[in-house]
Image: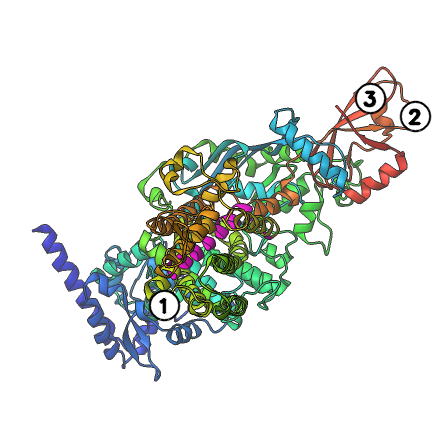
Amino acid sequence: MAQQDGSDEMESVRIQLSNIGRSVSTEEVQTLRTLTSFDDDGDYDDDDDDDDDYCYDDDDDEYESQWAAVERLPLFERITTALFDDKVGRKRLVNVTKLGPDERHCFIDKLIKHVQNDNLSLLEKLRHRIDSSIDAFSNPFVLRACLKFYRAGVQLPSVEVRYKNLSVQAECQVVHGKPLPTLWNATKGVFSGISNLLGSKQEAKISILKDVNGIIKPGRMTLLLGPPGCGKTTFLLALAGKLSQTLEVSGEITYNGYGLDEFNPRKTSTYVSQYDLHTPEMTVRETLAFSARFQGVGSRAEIIKEVSQREKQAGIVPDPDVDAYMKAISVEGTESTLQTDYILKILGLDNCADTMVGDAIRRGISGGEKKRLTTGEMIVGPTKVLFMDEISNGLDSSTSFQVVSCIQHLVHHTDATALISLLQPAPEIFDLFDDVILMAEGKVVYHGPRTYIRKFFKNCGFRCLERKGIADFIQEVISRKDQAQYWYHKEQPYRYVSVNQFIQKFKECKIGVSLEKELSDPLEKTQSRRDSLSFKRYSLSKWELFKACSRREFLLMKRNSFLYVFKTLQLLMGASMTMTVFLRTRMAVDIIHANYYLGALFFTLMLIIVDAFPELSLTVSRLEVFYKQRELCFYPAWAYAIPAAILKIPLSFLESFLLISLTYYTIGYSPEVGRFFRQFLVSFGLHVAGMSMFRLISSVSQTIVASTTAGTLALVIMSSFGGFIVTQHKCQVLFFTIFAPYMVAASMPSWLNWGFWLNPVSYGEIGMALNELLAPRWEKVKSGNTSAGQETLESRGLNFDSSFYWLSVAALFGLTALLNVIFMLALTFLKYYQLQGQEDSRDESIHNESKISVETDSTFSGSETDFLKNKPFPGNFIVSHVPVFSRARISSKISFFHSGTCKASFTLLGISQYQDTKQRLRMSKTRLYRTQS
């Protein structure tokens, strides 16, 4: 009863406020807005943006009636129905799940005319609606009393990322010799690989990240800076939970207090690589729409549902444009959404939205547009944690500022968590960030507010020069070569401050003490923090995954239609050659010409299998994008493999039918219609089996060179073991003893029978030969006690029973299924080593160790202290042509021997000042050679 009374009281207050609001004049409204501009603390809120709330005028009765119609709808229909402007500017009810491309384009153009200002305004209004949803034109005196009733108070999901005592180590192989591509080095590499398999390889362990600590907070932009080779990429991958399993990771990484093993970090966060990997046949809009569809809407649907319910209870009428935008981006499973057009607009990609991405062969968008597309592909989804690796590479300063500024607006107004690595940010871009993480030598030197970093280094004795960017200053001040120029205590002698000394000073400052204290208090695992994380691997259902991948595969087939047309024309040319060589008027039905018929059948089989060969290059070209999207948890391997196999079946059907239709009666095979379709069935089964086999080869080989080599070798093996060039021998394998009554001895050795029975061409040869040579017309001609057809089959080792035709057809389709299953498993469990090689070849990912000796021209005797004073060679320098990686920073550990010759042992850690140390090496006249033990 009390609950009912409270509900009636709320309804009466809502009606009273609505009546008062409509009765207030324009001047009174302005006065009331001034009165309501004071916040809860009594401070004046100087926000005069009239767009924050929807403004009522005398013509709003129609809008109110339309909105009342929306609120009378059931909840599910209410959150998918919004008011859109028609061509004359009047509002009309629209189902946001059925918005056309023109409607979406016009709506975004209306919302965002100037990207920098209007995008910020839209996000502010969106956040204002979620936080309060207060009617700005209600009676201010009643409003204060009813503020708690009218506040929606929906909290946006946010994620706080903590890392404590994080260390990453790698087991690396010690190699010797220069990595030049010579025949001798290649030969040695083969033997070293054999020795590695035998367990005689030398391994060493290096540290990439060393005991780093920090907190990345939501709603704040964090910049990651550091020289190349300091471990930035490894750090980002570690926080995103995407490090290779071959690396040893210690320490603790938590999201909202939950460890990485308690949820799915790859779905909760996203890692934006510096490599632009996209499908070249798709347009920019299609690429973003595909990404948005697989990432889903996250918590957007729940947020709009909760906000809509609370606004209805409070009688709040929202801004129609904000309401339409929030509802449109909350629709899941649609092929195109309003969010795609929004990202295109704010990233400046709307001008090239319908242009293909392109690649080295196909003309497409520019490199800078590809870089922005890589960023947009990730932020188009609902992910709340962003780890971005050098997203400004290849962009001009203006575009870089626009991209980073848009990300800043998203982070600040949606409580997202962003850690962005930039190489050399301009001062205006640097000022967009809230926090800065400075790394060096695999350690975190500074992690704190951007505004405090100048003061920190000034307390350490270093000051940024005039006209020097702060980002360049903090990266150079930790460098041995450039540090001295920033020393400003002229009355004191300069001494090099090492990275470890900077770290110690940071731990002693107030920011470092506060950070350590905050890390010591673990976050409580509350339900709201748990709801911000993702525990599912994929956002869509299995059926939706299959539909989306099938649509994309069909789209790519249409974009590559020229290739399929060319394949068909090539097949028709082969068919015309077959018809002219094996013309029916030149062949009789006898034993001599029976072998001609078998030759024609074998040539037909080879035409079919060669026609499937282009599937190999098509699959290889899409592997890098597939593995990227697989790691991003867009879809599983089966969702890619099954459509790739199913949608090619009509092509196989068409090409096989054309080939058999042109050659069957022209060559003069048995005229029965049933035998025509039986030969077509065999050719169709062989075609789909061949395409499945080449897809499998490409998924295992992964590169175009290796795949082409393996595919060509497979063609040679299939033609050799197909039962025509080398006839089949009587099989002695136990598995095939059931077929022994149908087999006779022939020229193929028994130990090679595996090549015959694992070969799809063999089953095609068996099926077509039995279909033709067991026809009635071959029974009429006798040669002794057997027909001409049977005698020919016996001479070829193909004298099977007629029922074996259906076994060969079943074997072809069974091989097709088996090859597709193996193809699916290969995509699921294999790593893309070409992409992994790109990651490992970065300066930040040098995972190798080598032993090097340095021997001076003159002997040295004395203590270690005296030796360090003389400095015959620098303690920190570059050695070029190091095994595997040619650039590496060497950290020396000096040891002395009784012979008086100084030697040093070095460990590769990363890149350092090459030119400076190269000059020092030249002056010291050192000689470098590899240790052989």
What amino acid does circle 1 point to? Thr
What mark, if any, has residue 865 been given in the picture?
Answer: 3
Query: Element under label 2?
Result: loop
Is 75 displayed left or right of 519 in the figure? Answer: left
Is 33 displayed left or right of 882 in the figure? Answer: left
Query: Element under label 3?
Result: helix
Compare residues 841 and 347 and report the one nearer the observer: 841
Marks 2 and 3, how far apart at CA:
18 Å
Is 185 displayed left or right of 390 in the figure? Answer: right
| Residue sticking out furthest to the right | 858
Q: Where, by quadrant of the figure, is residue 77 drawn?
A: bottom left
What mark, if any, has residue 858 been given in the picture?
Answer: 2
Q: Where, by quadrant of the figure, is residue 881 drawn?
A: top right
Can residue 586 be seen? yes
Magenta stretch? Answer: 680-704
Marks 1 and 2, how far apart at CA:
85 Å
| Residue sticking out furthest to the left | 1
Instruction: Say which residue appears at 57% left-offset and 62% top-offset.
Output: 370
Which residue is tagged 1?
34
Label 3 or label 1, whichever comes before in sequence order: 1
| Residue sticking out furthest to the front | 784
